[in-house]
Amino acid sequence: MKKQVLLTAAVLTATSMTAQKLKYPKAPKDGTIDTYFGVQVADPYRPLENDSSKATAEWVAAENKVTQDYLARIPFRGKLLKRMKELANYEKVSSPSFIKAIGKWLFYKNNGLQNQSVLYIMDRLGDEKNARIFLNPNQLSTDGTVALKGIYFSHNGKYAAYAISRSGSDWQEFYVMDAKTGKLLDDHINWAKFSSAAWQGDGFYYSAYDAPQKGHEFSNVNSVQKIYYHRIGTPQSEDILFYQNPANPMRFYSVYVNEDETMMFLYESGAGSGNRVYVRDLRQPDSQFIQMTSNLDLQYSLIETIGDKMYFLTNDGAPKNRLMVADLRHPGFSDWKTLIPESKDMLEGVTFADGKMILNYMKDASNHAYVYSMDGKQLSEIKLPTVGSAAFYGDKDRKEIFYSFSSFTVPTSNYQYDFSTGTSKVYSAPKVKFRESDYVSEQVFYPSKDGTRIPLFITYKKGLKRNGKNPVYLYAYGGFNIAMPPYFSSNRIPFLENGGIYAQACLRGGSEYGEEWHIAGTKMQKQNVFDDFIAAGEWLIRNKYTSKDYLAIVGGSNGGLLIGACMTQRPDLFKVCIPEVGVMDMLRYHKFTIGWNWAPDYGTSADSKEMFEYLRAYSPLHNLRPGTHYPATMITTADHDDRVVPAHSFKFAATLQADNAADTPIIIRIDTKAGHGSGKPLSKQLEEHADIYGFILYNMGLKY
């Protein structure tokens, strides 16, 4: 008989719930006061910014004890984690990719509960049963905290450079293998960041910073990114400095060399929402870079090179993107030609294969794909399985085309598309221990505060009663031109299968409707994002999906800022808040690691008095008020997060614990040997999600 796990609305006893306020450790303080345009702003927990100090370490240890003691009280914590492990224990396989340089197919596979996916190689398409392991990241550490960030094959097929990160940090190291034998060579690169390996001959270009100050590797600001050329068989100390621009230290620089090694592209970004592109003709000895574009607020993404032609996806003159063609002989933007003009929907990506193009559009936050001829004529639509997300993979010189597809109730599956018949067939599909047909996903649209129409996805078990008593996990991001389309996560299933609702809002600041939608959620329009999210919660309550006693809000990074801002603006609306690795100090965020790169979306406190006042008005840290009743809150961060440094969460937690007048728990979960999220081992992901869902249900007075 199948065991049933019940979610009930029984209120737990005072001994298991927090009947009285938790006792929190005393955080290190000083008398720091900053002055912005004549306005004094106190920052009493400034010592917590020093992540290597003894005082901070002691506070972190004490906070973690409070958190772990509290989480240990949740009676169903272990049961929830066990179910999540059962659900995650299925084979996950990527679409295969043909590597022209070596004439082989590569794909990633995770047998189920492996901490990191393994890279496999096969001689022929469809021969997965005889595939061999090419690189297993699980063998690079004993605890799964070393992640593979990318692999890059030399165009001559001799070498493979791969990048790893340790403990979730953005810092990268490069190693090199013999592509044919798999033998690890002596080459080793340190202190690369946000870098690929761009091969030319028997060496590659990479982007790196000077070695950081010891003890401050994960907090000090990163400036003057440099491009180096590394020749195989030589030490990093002999690498050739290829490019740097000290006059603009807060920018990113990288190069790309096409597979024919006829063109080299230099990319410059970080000072706006877009990038500049320069090109160099490698067929001409001593050729110099020619500037192709100039506006750093617009995006130019190279899709393909064919002969002297360069195909770019750009929002220059097209807020929802268009496909343009440039010629190496006249590369300036004024000479570019439009191949696919802007349409009413957002053009998200273009894939070349078999002398055709596949254009992947986003319509109301889900994908729709079409086949086009090389002269820009639409030939047919690719029918996708249902409403969801699709990503296409192909090579301009091969006929095979694959796409991965997922939705809220559809685990990621891989399909092969046949151009000749216009049909798709399943190439590989996982078997997850739940019944997709038991669940419903719907999309609704609700009005924000100013009347703007906002998309909202809602997923729940069939038979749901709209009685205002259903627990809701409301998630969003709302920034940096990042869309929130449907995607699958087995971690949601325990919540859904026991009566919970997963709701995902597509806020302004994202890319769902193009650059205008993005801009509407940036700088001095950032409040739109918070209004959109608050309106989602109000709509769910008004339509009886839930009530404020069963509404939890969750978001990470920029989404952590979202949660922090909304819980300080409307503490009465939410029962539980989970700000994950959030940007909480909007006055100082740009002073750490690569925080300066977020200025195009946020603005900075140094820009102007008006920008300072706007940031201060919503900065989560600066809008906590003593004597306020705040919702139950679990803040998450990690010791190796060098994207959004832990100081944001540390200072927010210390202030919130001091200011909260309610008996609700305010805890901070500080992970070790982990970073912003990318590359986190599966075991750590499962533990964290079990704690998050457990904290939510426990503080709603529910059982699992």
Image: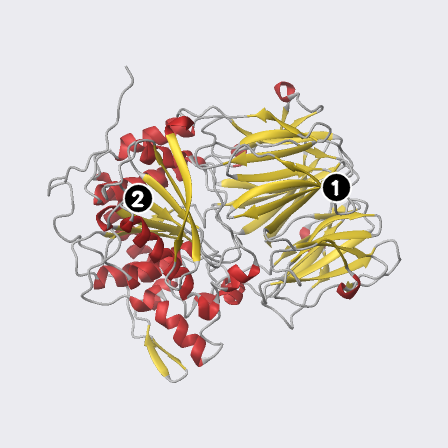
Question: Residue 243: x percent and y percent?
Answer: 71, 62
Choose between 432 and 19: the one closer to the eye. 432
Secondary structure category for the residue under label 1: loop
Choose between 417 and 463: the one closer to the eye. 463
- The residue type indicated by label 1 comes to Ser
Mark 1–mark 2 distance (CA, rounded to whole Å): 49 Å
Residue under the point 81% across and 52% down: 309
Secondary structure category for the residue under label 2: strand
Residue topped by disc 2: 472
Question: Residue 202: x percent and y percent?
Answer: 78, 45
Q: Are marks 1 and 2 in contact (CB under 8 Å)?
A: no
N-term-proximal mark, 1 vs 2: 1
Residue under the point 50% across and 42% down: 679
Q: Residue furthest top?
A: 1
Residue under the point 49% across and 70% down: 603
In the picture shown, does residue 586 fall above or below 380? below
In the picture shown, does residue 563 fall above or below 367? below
In this rendering, would 470 be left or right of 211?
left
Question: Residue 214: x percent and y percent?
Answer: 49, 59
Residue topped by disc 1: 154
Q: Quadrant of the N terminus?
A: top left
